[in-house]
Image (spheres, grey):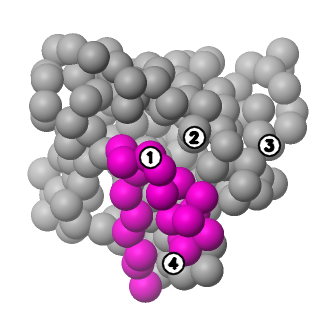
Amino acid sequence: MAIGVSMKVQLIDANKERLNDLKHALSDLPQIGFIEVEKAAYIYPPRGLDMIFLTLVFAAEEWNADIKSRTAQILTTPPEKQEKGFPPLIVTGVNLTPEDPKDPLSQVRIVLESVFDAVRGFDRTAPGKVKYLGFWVMDLTRGVTVTQLSELLHRLLQNETTDP
């Protein structure tokens, strides 16, 4: 599941130990980068991203996102938010259905698959516009270990390095 040849997924975290564990576990995936921040807070995203994943709860309030089951959506960041450091685009809107698995790892898989699908679709209409896609690690590790997350990212991104 390639997300874009020139795109890099940036994992953002304030927990240095967890970020170092992820760096070690994902060192063989060149499309993964890491950003250490002083404080992990949605309202203070790191600079340099083109797009960031925000949970539906945060994005629905701030960006007026539609609530869609199993579908991520890409929204433009208003200029006043960009001035405060938000990237030009956000990706959000992955609402799980009652039929979806309840375990945290399956739910993170559904979210990542939905986000990567939306980003791939966006990249077809605006190639190269998104070079850096950020994820807060705290959104991917609620009930999920670093090992589980790294194995999941390997499965989802394994074809990225072999795609022509």
Q: Residue at x 63, y 49 (%)?
A: 150
Which residue is tagged 1? 29
Q: Range of the magenta residues?
A: 19-38
Q: Are marks 2 and 4 in contact (CB under 8 Å)?
A: no
* Vertical arrangement, residue 86 with respect to residue 104, above or below: below
Q: CA distance from mark 2 to mark 4?
A: 20 Å
Q: Badge 3 local density, few (<14 within 10 Å), some, or many (20+)?
A: some
Q: Nearer the viewer, mark 1 or mark 4?
A: 1
Q: Badge 4 local density, few (<14 within 10 Å), some, or many (20+)?
A: some
Instruction: Out of 62 and 95, give the one closest to the viewer.
Output: 95
Label 2 vs 1, first from the N-terminus? 1
| Residue that lies at the very extreme toward the bottom in this rendered image | 38
Which residue is tagged 3? 104
Q: Is residue 51 visible?
A: no
Q: Secondary structure at mark 3?
A: helix
Amino acid under label 1?
Answer: Leu
Q: Position of residue 122 (x, y in %)?
A: 26, 21
Which residue is tagged 4? 14
For the C terminus, give its image quadrant: top left
Q: Position of residue 163 (x, y in %)?
A: 34, 19
Specify whether residue 22 is painted magenta: yes
Q: Are marks 1 and 4 in contact (CB under 8 Å)?
A: no
